[in-house]
Image (cartoon, rainbow, N blue to C red):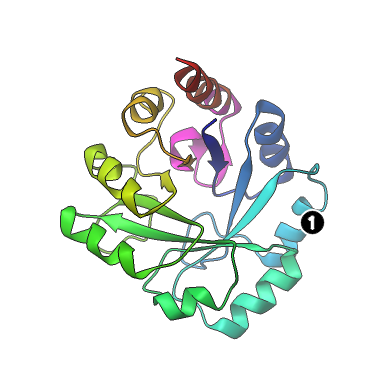
């Protein structure tokens, strides 16, 4: 079963809607330059209301180790997603629940993945000056190739309209969506959420 992560959660209503509709994980963005940024304390208020078996993931971009540890403690999160230029050695300091994101520009991007020993690799679209949230897809055939390195979480421009095709082609460990199910930056459209999750489940069963 393909895992579903709804990223950019900023409020309890969206968190509970995602959970009730069948999401497996929720992403909380601690990158201050992101339009979906949330303070760790506010994230903690949401996370403490989540049911068991729902996994919260903290997203960081080129943050210091001390600030990461402080945010994780405040928000009561163990899972980490690094979306910057973090080195393999840096990622290994945070245990076994680490996702490393790569912005896929071409096949050369995939060569860097072999240096990382992480729980999963998130593949996002490349766009100059942006750290995710591009709203654009990339060549999914590259994601198929990337599966040789380990678990792949597919991201980048996924929507209710294209996620079934992506799942069928790539057969990833998981999919990740933020903007594709929003009505405004950081605010989810619950109808889109429902359709996205439904499409993933349908594609998985076929």
Does 146 sit above or below residue 85?
Answer: above
Q: What element carries label 1?
A: helix
Relative placement, left or right, of 165 versus 12 is: left
Q: Nearer the viewer, residue 143 or 134?
A: 143
Q: Residue 122 location in percent, x, y?
A: 41, 52
Q: Nearer the viewer, residue 140 or 136?
A: 140
Residue farthest toward the front in the current orientation of the protein: 148
Mark 1 crowdedness (10 Å alpha carbons): few <14, some 14-19, many ≥20: some
The tally of labels here is 1
Q: Residue 93 location in percent, x, y?
A: 55, 78
Look at 69% across and 35% down and name the residue there.
19
Relative placement, left or right, of 68 versus 70 is: left
In the rendered image, the quadrant that contains the C terminus is top left
Picture quadrant of residue 189: top right
Is residue 6 part of the magenta span, yes or no?
Answer: no
Residues shaded magenta:
178-193
Does 64 sit above or below residue 104?
Answer: below
**Residue at mark 1:** 45
Look at 20% across and 54% down and name the residue there.
105
Picture quadrant of residue 101: bottom left
Is residue 191 part of the magenta span, yes or no?
Answer: yes
Q: Residue 8 location in percent, x, y?
A: 55, 49
In the rendered image, the quadrant that contains the N terminus is top right
Q: Residue 131 location in percent, x, y?
A: 37, 61
Relative placement, left or right, of 112 versus 159 is: left
């Amino acid at each position: 079963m393909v895992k579903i992560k709804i990223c950019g959660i900023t409020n309890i209503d969206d968190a509970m809607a995602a959970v009730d509709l069948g999401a497996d994980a929720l992403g909380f963005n601690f990158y201050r330059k992101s339009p979906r940024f949330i303070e760790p304390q506010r994230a903690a208020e949401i996370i403490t209301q989540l049911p068991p078996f729902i996994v919260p993931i903290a997203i960081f971009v080129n943050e210091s180790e001390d600030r990461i540890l402080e945010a994780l403690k405040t928000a009561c999160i163990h899972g980490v997603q690094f979306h910057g230029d973090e080195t393999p050695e840096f990622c290994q300091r945070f245990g076994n629940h680490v996702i490393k994101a790569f912005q896929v520009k071409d096949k050369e991007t995939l060569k860097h993945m072999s240096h990382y020993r992480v729980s999963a690799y998130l593949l996002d679209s490349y766009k100059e000056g942006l750290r995710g949230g591009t709203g654009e897809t990339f060549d999914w055939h590259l994601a198929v190739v990337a599966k040789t390195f380990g678990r792949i979480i597919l991201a980048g421009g996924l929507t209710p309209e294209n996620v079934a095709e992506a799942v069928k082609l790539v057969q990833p460990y998981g999919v990740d969506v933020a903007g594709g199910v929003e009505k405004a930056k950081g605010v989810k459209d619950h109808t889109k959420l429902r359709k996205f999750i439904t499409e993933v489940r349908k594609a998985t069963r076929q």
